[in-house]
Amino acid sequence: MNTDIQSIIANMTLEEKAALCTGASAWSTTPVERLGVPEMIVSDGPHGIRRVPDIHSMAQHSLPATCFPTASCSASTWDVELMGQLGAALAEEAIALHVDVVLGPGVNMKRSPLGGRNFEYFSEDPYLAGELAVNFINGVQSKGVGTSLKHYAANNQEFQRFSINAEVDERILREIYLPAFEKAVKETQPWMVMCSYNKVNGVFASEHHTLLTKILKDEWGFEGLVVSDWGTVRDRVAALRGGVDWEMPGPQDRRVKAVVEAVRSGELAEATLDESVRRILRIVFKAQETPKGGAFDVDAHHRLARKIAAEGMVLLKNDGLLPLKGHQQIAVIGRSAEAAHFQGGGSSHINPTRVDVPFQELQSRANNAELTYAEGYPADDSFRQDLIDQAVGLTLSADVALLYIALPTYKESEGYDRTDLDLTVQQVALIQAVAKAQPKTVVVLNNGAPVAMSAWIDAVPAVLEGWMMGQAGGAALADVLFGQVNPCGKLAETFPLKLSDTPAHLNWPGGAGKVQYGEGLFIGYRYYDAKELPVLFPFGHGLSYTTFAYSNAKVSAKTFRDVDGLTVTVDVTNTGHMAGKEIVQVYVHDRAWGLVRPEKELKGFAKVALQPGETKSVAIKLDFRAFAYYHPEYKQWITEDGNFDILIASSSADIRHTLAVTLESTLNLPCILDRESTIREWLADPRGKVAFGPFYAQIEEQSRKMSGGGDGDESAIGMDIMDMMGDMPLVSVLMFQQSALPMHPEDLADGLLTQVHGQAK
Ligand code: BGC
């Protein structure tokens, strides 16, 4: 095979190049047989392989594949090794199903719990999402199969997802919406990145030169190809110029012709087209290095799906009722006990190799207990009191009730957002009625994103969040309920008390074609922290059947340089009677900042398995980025000298140790002072202080004299003039203070600027 890409490009006709940059079918690249360029096949993603038999079909029934837990569930494992195993298993299935690239993972932030596709995304926290994505991608790519990181960028809602303009400031993009992409790209080089449907700050993501070319390719060094999300490209030539190498789906004859004509007319540089061709050929040939075909181990993958599901489930509440033991009569209520709700609707919908039925799985573990079943709620949105009455009747003769409640697809799916956080009216009434009749009631939830529980949570002693748990989730639920697995999952997203508390509430879902990210940096726990709002369950929360104690918390240095970072260590002891796993979280709190920062941010975590009585020391490394923030004027991540608190926590609301440290910044930042910079900014900048300090002293003296000598209430005009002046631009202050100055304000400003920059600005 001729894989000398430069010589292939040199031999390709313009038509062949343009055709290669558009798909040949719904799922494949265009081959160039005469030059030995084969086709490459991609499939969804992200939690299973949706390989349709006919690659010209978008939505045919796909071939059987393991439906692993969706991202909400796998993220709640906080288990980077498990993510690697998941990735490797997906790759094995891709190979067997003749798929070269898996369309996933998705690392968009959960800006609002209403996002219809949140089940496909990991977290509300960019650090956690990035770590999970890195391991997922490494797992897949270690087997010679590609990934396609998606959806880049600011694709955080389904409402008008094909067109909405996400208005989001650069700092917010850099600190919240891009870091998971950045980390994954820099650390793993995914073969592909998929651009999103929406616009970002007025430009379609598919034409966004700053996002696709300047940031992704040039700044982060992305070597793979950028693929369009399916059907997003409006203007193929503009998309090529922006940085979309491969348009999908195909074939698109007109698009190909448009590209050819644009090159002929000089509208599009052939070098731009060649660069996209080069990127595509590189991946197409890379894909060929892994022979496809064969079979995958269906049983082993089902077992892995069960393991991930069991570790991703989150025990939200438990007043001692779980794990189940010694019960004679168990009433199992709810349709999802028979018809497992294990995945979401849309492009990620997998045709599972098999499905564990939750009720049967309970039965197989229940020893001598008798299990009964009632449907509890209908499949549609009708209200059926008879089903509630029947369930209550069953409950009365039982000594425990297990309520399986699944959020129906009509309330949650790709393609549309949720309109509320509620379960159905019937489900709420059912829980209330059953809990009233049977104090020993466990609610088992299957949903892709948080639901409100205020109407019933106080009436039930236990709640297990089972998520969209994948095809083996039914068994995993039974494992956890009966204590064969000790739950260890923790929330990768906050469960709010009510919708009106949520960060984006006043800016959701937008209108008139745009949505403003008005909550800024403050999504998820960053928002609830800042507002001091109570939540239902905090980010990072999850119970276990055992307990853990933290001791001996230390940092490697009390004072450290940003480039050296820090290592945090803490001993964790299993103080209960059952083996279990704890997820230790490290948050960083900046005590003083130049630009507003969240109260705390997750910057490290570790999962540790402990036998009863066992202690292990956990070490977590914090790097430069753990302390830095993105400064839009410096256009870079900066650190500032100062004091930080390192919070060692069991959840974002359960801080076990706080350690004070002092950072020394090694940055030599460029001077960004200009005429409009405030006096405070001039004095805060080392160069500004040297230049302006002496004049400031004169101004200060003159002001005091003029205002009668006193401060605040005692001054002639009843205010602290110097305090007010701090926020005035240099030019304004100089104009007001002419009489205290040795020269004309304009000349002085010019002189100061020349001194700090070497030239006036
Ligand atoms: C989705 C992508 C998916 C693609 C192909 C699009 O509608 O947004 O996530 O990979 O379809 O199915």
Image (tube, rainbow, N blue to C red):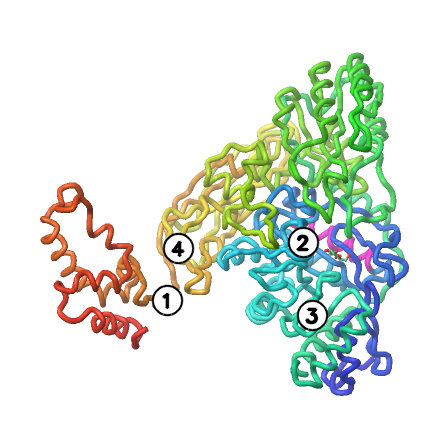
Disc 3 marks which residue? 235
Q: Nearer the viewer, mark 3 or mark 1?
A: 3
Instruction: Please name whichever residue, 541 or 556, is drawn nearer the observer in this view of the structure.
Output: 541
**Above or below, 554 relative to 683:** above
Q: Are marks 4 and 2 in contact (CB under 8 Å)?
A: no
Instruction: Please name whichever residue, 434 or 73, is drawn nearer the observer in this view of the structure.
Output: 434
Q: Nearer the viewer, mark 2 or mark 1?
A: 2
Q: Nearer the viewer, mark 3 or mark 4?
A: 3
Q: Amino acid at mark 3?
A: Asp
Question: Would residue 563 be visible to someone looking at this image?
Answer: no
Would you say 747 lies left or right of 59 here? left
Q: Residues within 10 Å of mark 1 (few under 14, many from 20)?
A: few
Q: N-terminal of the two: label 4 or label 2? A: 2
Disc 2 marks which residue? 161
Q: N-terminal of the two: label 3 or label 4? A: 3
Instruction: Please name whichever residue, 248 or 457, is drawn nearer the observer in this view of the structure.
Output: 248
Q: Nearer the viewer, mark 1 or mark 4?
A: 1
Res. 560 mark:
4
Residue 653 percent coordinates (x, y): 51, 35
Q: Amino acid at mark 4?
A: Phe
